[in-house]
Image (cartoon, rainbow, N blue to C red):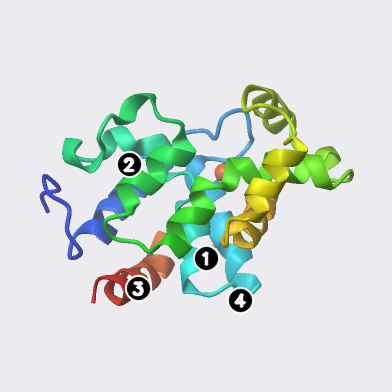
Amino acid sequence: MSFNTLNRENIVDFIANIFERRGAESYLGERVTMAEHMLQSARLAEMEDAGDELIASALLHDIGHYTNEFPEDALEKGQDNHHEDAGPQVLAAFFPPAVTEPIRLHVAAKRYLCAVDPDYFGRLSDASVHTLNLQGGPMSEDEVDAFRANPHHRNAVRMRIWDDDAKVPGQTTPGFDHYAPLLQRVIDLYLE
Ligand SMILES: [Fe+2]
């Protein structure tokens, strides 16, 4: 299948192909691969009956690390983007804001939780503490207010917790194929 142009018929295969070819790459400083990490995130969402859209969001939350895989027209000026912005940018043509907004906010959600939940910081992995500093540290009060004003902020926080917990070495999960029909369902509902 050619992926020169993405459409609703080939986008799920396209993403499956990224998982297949690039999934074995390590997840920056963690002891799981990228595919393990994203599949563990989706599994945690699924175990909480989070619903199709939020499960899709968890599954795809780090796809922004792979935006160099997407055809050029999918991304305007992509390569220097932060992964939390690049992912939603390429997904927005196929997935609703209920999927892309928690992805866009998943780094902000970490900064938010560090500001409002004293216990949260202690749960972060070393790599995650390191990136927190690069990402601007805990939110200020004004940033907290602005974050809470986004209607998707609660789901972004839920996803953040799954993201943090989805770093268990050797844990088995269903594979990408298990989620392919769910992704197609979300896409078809949105583009109908
Ligand atoms: Fe992640």
Which residue does the numbered mark 3 point to in the structure image? 181
Which of the two marks, 4 or 1, is nearer to us in this view? 1
Mark 1 residue's CB less than 8 Å from ligand 1: no
Q: Amino acid at mark 1?
A: Leu
Q: Earlier in the sequence, mark 4 or mark 3?
A: 4
Q: Quadrant of residue 111?
A: top right
Q: Percent from the top left, x then y, of residue 174?
A: 50, 64
Which quarter of the rendered image does ligand 1 occupy? top right
Q: Percent from the top left, x then y, of residue 133?
A: 69, 23
Dividing the image into 4 quarters, which one contains the C terminus?
bottom left
* Image height of 137 relative to 97, above or below: above
What distance separates the C-alpha of mark 4 from that of mark 1? 9 Å
Helix, strand or loop at disc 1? Answer: helix
Q: Amino acid at mark 4?
A: Asp
Q: Residues within 10 Å of mark 4 (few under 14, many from 20)?
A: few
Q: Percent from the top left, x then y, of residue 137?
A: 72, 28
Q: Residue at x 66, y 72 (%)?
A: 48
Mark 3 residue's CB less than 8 Å from ligand 1: no
Q: Residues within 10 Å of mark 1 (few under 14, many from 20)?
A: many
Image-based side of 94 in relation to 8, left or right: right
Q: Residue at x 82, y 38 (%)?
A: 121
Q: Earlier in the sequence, mark 2 or mark 3?
A: 2
Which residue does the numbered mark 4 point to in the structure image? 49
Q: Which mark is residue 21?
A: 2
What distance separates the C-alpha of mark 4 from that of mark 3? 16 Å
Helix, strand or loop at disc 2? Answer: helix
Which residue does the numbered mark 1 point to in the structure image? 54
Q: Amino acid at mark 3?
A: Pro
State yes or no: discs 4 and 3 in contact (Cβ < 8 Å).
no
Q: Earlier in the sequence, mark 4 or mark 1?
A: 4
Helix, strand or loop at disc 3? Answer: helix
Q: Residues within 10 Å of mark 3 (few under 14, many from 20)?
A: few
